[in-house]
Structure formats: structure tokens, C-alpha cells
Image (spheres, helix red, strand yellow):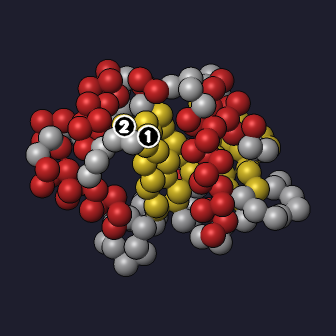
């Protein structure tokens, strides 16, 4: 739990952006609550873990440097209707204090072989049409724009030695 303090410290900045509203820094400051939170994230990867009907198994990885939490990336093992429209197989987020330093690019690069190892030869990523940084990260990894709907761009990326991502 080396990144406990820096993870909790990142929560208020995310709250200010309207994200992570379900994470209470006062609660997660307690080591036992933080350990339970991390345990819940780890359990998401197990297909046998009970989950809501609209959730799929997913693996959550934290991007860190020493004891500093920099961001997270989630690899969803499958798609459902909701994720096909917005969300996709992979979602990533860099903590506000660590943006524009190349972390998202590195995180996605590290996640693609993991997705391939899960049997996903190509993955869907979505981003807001106005999120130029995210678009650049996806396109830098070979993402091909599939379509645009309701302000979201949908890209397909090859994760391993496939011939065609479309």
C-alpha cells in the first residue's frame, strides 16, 4: 500500500473535476478501508465475482512512480451494449497533478499487451470529441477512428500481431 497517501491526496482534485465522487478521502484515509477498496478493485478481474448486470470483468492497474500515484488504467475483458457506445475495453485517467507528462501514452502502451494476453486482439477505446489529448494518445498507438456518436469518438486498436483493426 505504498501509494496510499498519494492516492488519497489525488481525490480532491478529481472531485473538483466532477470525477471520483464515490471516493471519500476521509474514509479511504483509514488503512483498513483503503485495503478493502483495493481488494474490491482486484476482485473485479475474477469472472466469478458478483457484479451489477451492466458490469463486466475488468482489471485495474495503477500507474505509479515510487510511492506516487500517477493514474490508473482499466482493461475490460468484454464489452456490453453500454461499453460499446461509451467506455470501450480500455479506460485511463491521469491524476490532475501529473497530466501532460506522457503518462497516458505510456499507460496505454503498457496495457495493450495485457489486453492481448486476455485474448483481446483488438480493443475499443472511446473519448470525448473535444479531448484532444486523449485522441492523440489513442492515435499514437494506431487507433483507427470507427465513428462518432453523441460527442464520443470510438476507436479500434490492435493489441498484438493482428492484420486489421477495422
State the image quarter where residue 144 is shown. top right
Residue ID at (60%, 31%): 102
Mark 2 neighbour class, 10 Å CA radius: few under 14, some 14 to 19, many 20 or more: some
Q: How much space separates mark 2 and mark 1, taking CA atoms?
A: 5 Å
What residue is pinned by disc 1?
Answer: 65
Q: Nearer the viewer, residue 68 or 50?
A: 68
Q: Position of residue 16 (x, y in %)?
A: 32, 21
Q: Nearer the viewer, residue 144 or 31?
A: 31
Residue ID at (65%, 55%): 112
| Residue 78 visible from this viewpoint | yes
Q: Position of residue 70 (x, y in %)?
A: 43, 36
Whether residue 74 sits left or right of residue 126 in the image: it is left
Residue ID at (81%, 64%): 161
| Residue 81 visible from this viewpoint | no
Q: Residue 110, relative to residue 24: is it above or below? A: below
Outermost residue on the right side: it is 163
Residue ID at (27%, 62%): 39
What residue is pinned by disc 2?
Answer: 68
Q: Position of residue 23 (x, y in %)?
A: 24, 40
Helix, strand or loop at disc 1?
A: strand
Whether residue 148 sits left or right of residue 14 in the image: it is right
Mark 1 neighbour class, 10 Å CA radius: few under 14, some 14 to 19, many 20 or more: few
* 2 and 1 marks in contact (CB < 8 Å): yes
Q: Nearer the viewer, residue 149 or 67?
A: 67
Q: How many marks?
A: 2
Q: Position of residue 125 (x, y in %)?
A: 63, 46
State the image quarter where residue 64 is shown. top left
Whether residue 89 sits left or right of residue 66 in the image: it is right
Amino acid at each position: 500500500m505504498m501509494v496510499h497517501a498519494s492516492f488519497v491526496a489525488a481525490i480532491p482534485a478529481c472531485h473538483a473535476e466532477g470525477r471520483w465522487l464515490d471516493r471519500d478521502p476521509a474514509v479511504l484515509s483509514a488503512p483498513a478501508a483503503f485495503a478493502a477498496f483495493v481488494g474490491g478493485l482486484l476482485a473485479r478481474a475474477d469472472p466469478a465475482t458478483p457484479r451489477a448486470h451492466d458490469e463486466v470483468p475488468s482489471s485495474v492497474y495503477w500507474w505509479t512512480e515510487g510511492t506516487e500515484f500517477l493514474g490508473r488504467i482499466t482493461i475490460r475483458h468484454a464489452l456490453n451494449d453500454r461499453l460499446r457506445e461509451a467506455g470501450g475495453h480500455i479506460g485511463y485517467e491521469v491524476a490532475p497533478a501529473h497530466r501532460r507528462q506522457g503518462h497516458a501514452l505510456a499507460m496505454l502502451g503498457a496495457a495493450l499487451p495485457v489486453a492481448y494476453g486476455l485474448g483481446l486482439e483488438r480493443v475499443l477505446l472511446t473519448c470525448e470529441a473535444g479531448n484532444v489529448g486523449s485522441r492523440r494518445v489513442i492515435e499514437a498507438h494506431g487507433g483507427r477512428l470507427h465513428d462518432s456518436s453523441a460527442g464520443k469518438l470510438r476507436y479500434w486498436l490492435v493489441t498484438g500481431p493482428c492484420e486489421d483493426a477495422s
